Amino acid sequence: MKLLRATASLLFCLVVLSLSVSAQTSTGGVNGTISDPNGAAVPGSTVRLVNQAASIETRATTNESGYFTFVNVNPGTYFLKVEAQGFSTAQTPPFDVGVNQVVPQNIALTVGAVSQTVEVVAAGEMLQPSSAELGTVIPKEAVQDLPLNGRNFTQLLSLTPGATPVNTAQGGSVTFQDAGPTGIPGTTIVKPAIHGQQNRSTLYFQDGFINTDLRGPIYGIPPIVDVIQEFKVQGHNDKSEYGGVTGGIVNVVSRSGGNSYHGSAYEFVRNDAFDARNPFSDSTRLSPAPFRQNQFGGTFGGRIIKNKTFFFAAFEGWRFSKPTGDQAYIPTAAELVGDFTNSPQRNQNFNPYSTRRNPANQNQFIRDPFKCASPRTPTRCARRPSRRAVAPPTVCAPTTVGSTPARLLPPRGRSGISDAMCCEAPASITWTCRCSGRFASGRRKSYSSQKERPVCPSRVAAY
């Protein structure tokens, strides 16, 4: 029983520690000093940090030096209220707190009654003298207003000073296959080198958690653009919270709901019905090739408990349809039973047990194509020791691709190298669905999750 309790306590500590560590990379902070008109410190002052959108209020008290600090502040717009005995209440104008950014706010109080409110006009310096990091915050307005091909936010990385595109030979371009299941055909994925560091070692964060694909420097789950509150691009400067990364850092923070309920819906459409024909292709008036792309979704956020708990959720679907072509080699009837003697030279399948020296040249070795002994059956023609490693003939059926009939080019029996063919499918449909949610409470704790479910990512069917 004691061992069980100790194990449970250890796991609880590890979970709490991981949450606190992860929060350091996606939140910011506010600090400063409170002084009187003569510049002397005012200890014991009550400082309130208020979120302008959600009206969440956090309090702190200045120490003997008049210093105060707020940590783990979610990115957003805030203002400060300061109250002290014998001084008027001071209020700062709204200011923004960015990702992993500490905003200094030094406030000088004026003598008066506490019931009087004095608005501090001077804004605090945004320079952080205690940090030498180089980074740029891309706000929500830029993410949502600037045009993005396929609504992929990585295209905005080029807005960062010091972000340099890398040529293709060095891995600067990423294709749909490179991005794996997170990629979307037809979209643009940017993978620059940040401040001269390796573009292959960029680390992506989503709300404090690592969101980097295992196969390369790209996100593991693509964030929905309407969910992004802001993101920060910075060069790696060996800070402990970013341990294990040798390249740049892309830190994405999700939006949170407020006291009011808000929602949105959208759809981006590309269709061949809107396209003009290519006047330089030929003189024949041909309609544009079939192409259809729909990207649609919506968001909704609001409060669960006023001034305390909020939620924000989003959904995005993506549908892509475009004719595709592929070439495949269809085995002949003789090859299906293991006879490759009449196959073209480039498609020969040789028997390794027939390897011997060439009588005409002892420095060369020759082998014979596979040829089954009579009677020719797949079982007798299977290579040792995997006698059952033979695909059934239905797998090689030349008239279907997946579950949809395809046209054979050229038709079987006509010109072509050993029944070579081109499968021209009517359309290739890709479905991608993503859901994202975030909960935030008045204690500055946030919980977020995002899931992606590809539906039939490579199914061939009619549109």
Image (cartoon, rainbow, N blue to C red):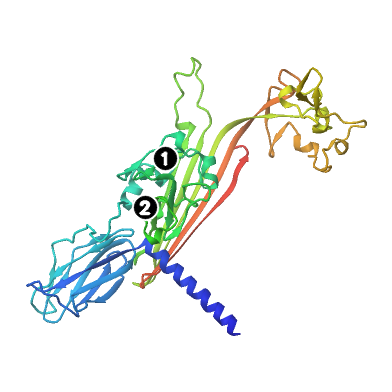
Q: Position of residue 287 (x, y in %)?
A: 51, 24
Residues under numbered marks 2 and 1 in contact, where contact means CB atoms less than 8 Å apart: no
For residue 256, say whether it is visible. Answer: no
- Specify the quadrant that holds the C terminus: top right
Residue pointed to by mark 1: 149
For residue 352, say whether it is visible. Answer: yes
Up-down: is 454 above or below 81? above
- At label 2, the amino acid type is His
Q: Position of residue 449 (x, y in %)?
A: 48, 61
In the displayed structure, does residue 330 sit left or right of residue 207? right
Mark pair 2, 1: CA separation: 28 Å
Q: Considering the numbered disc 1 on the image, is that residue within a helix, a strand or a loop?
A: loop
**In front here: 437 or 101?**
101
Question: Residue pushed farthest top?
Answer: 283
- Total residue callouts: 2
Return the disc, 2 or 1, that comes first in the chain's sequence: 1
Which of the 4 quarters of the picture holds residue 399?
top right
- At label 1, the amino acid type is Asn
Residue lying at 16% horizontally and 79% vertically, measured from the top left: 84
Residue pointed to by mark 2: 236
Residue lying at 74% horizontally and 31% vertically, measured from the top left: 398
Question: Residue pushed farthest front?
Answer: 362
Q: Considering the numbered disc 2 on the image, is that residue within a helix, a strand or a loop?
A: loop
Up-down: is 319 above or below 371? below
Density class for disc 1 (Cα within 10 Å; few <14, some 14-19, many ≥20) is few
Q: Position of residue 341 (x, y in %)?
A: 82, 24
Residue lying at 11% horizontally and 78% vertically, measured from the top left: 87
Q: Position of residue 290 (x, y in %)?
A: 53, 31
In the displayed structure, does residue 408 sit left or right of residue 450? right
**In front here: 92 or 71?**
71
Which of the 4 quarters of the picture holds residue 121?
bottom left
Up-down: is 411 above or below 303? above
